[in-house]
Image (cartoon, helix red, strand yellow):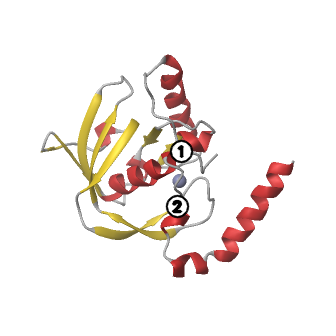
Amino acid sequence: MLRRKGARVEAVTPAIRQLIADMIETMYADKGIGLSAQQVGVPVQVLVIDVREAADRPSTLEVNGQPADVNQFMPLALINPQITPVGEPVAGPEGCLSFPEIYADIIRPEVVEVRALNREGEPMQFRCGGLLARAIQHETDHLHGILFIDRMTKEIKEQLRPELETLRAETKEGLKG
Ligand code: ZN
């Protein structure tokens, strides 16, 4: 499921709104700051974000060229998001609810321009940086079947090999049962 590309959402139906509500609930229950529809078994282009838990890692936000309050923007649901890098690539720590206990520095653009539909199906556009930009890029990758292990440097992936092998074995065992 995590390797499947999400289908574009053509219409924001009550089923999509319910999916968003369920995803936000799951994200909070798992104490995550982001979740993609793939991670709850639905391959469509929907993600949710709430960076308020990670108050020690700053985010920036600009809407219509004006600075905006990140907290008031949360929780954020994005449908069919499209990302354009703006800032320079920087390394920052990431984890993933689908890879428990595994953390690594990942290099991503620090600032991105985002276009998407909101949960009302209306087009939205904004520019963000810091943790918010990182979280949106991580979750948008999920929508295209890309995982953060794909973006690790060879060296980091090599260091994490024992943990990744254990997780792979456990996942296989889980699928049998
Ligand atoms: Zn993830």
User: In terms of secondary structure, where does tag 2 sit?
Assistant: loop
Q: Which percent across, then down, holds residue 73?
A: 31, 38
Crowd around label 2: few <14 · some 14–19 · many ≥20 (10 Å): some
Q: Mark 1 is on which residue type?
A: Lys
Give the Cα distance between marks 2 and 1: 21 Å
Look at mark 2 in the image and give the residue it sits on.
95
Q: Are marks 2 and 1 in contact (CB under 8 Å)?
A: no
Q: Find residue 1 and report its image quarter.
A: top right
* Residue 17 visible, this orientation: yes
Front residue of 105 and 9: 9
Q: Which percent across, then down, holds residue 17?
A: 48, 24
Q: Residue at x 61, y 39 (%)?
A: 40
Which is more N-terminal, label 1 or label 2? 1
Q: Which percent across, then down, holds residue 147?
A: 54, 58
Q: Residue at x 81, y 52 (%)?
A: 174
Crowd around label 1: few <14 · some 14–19 · many ≥20 (10 Å): some
Q: Mark 2 is on which residue type?
A: Gly
Q: Residue at x 46, y 49 (%)?
A: 139
Q: Is mark 2 within 8 Å of ligand 1?
A: yes
Q: Please, is residue 7 above or below residue 107 in the view?
A: above
* Residue 75 visible, this orientation: no
Look at mark 1 in the image and give the residue it sits on.
5
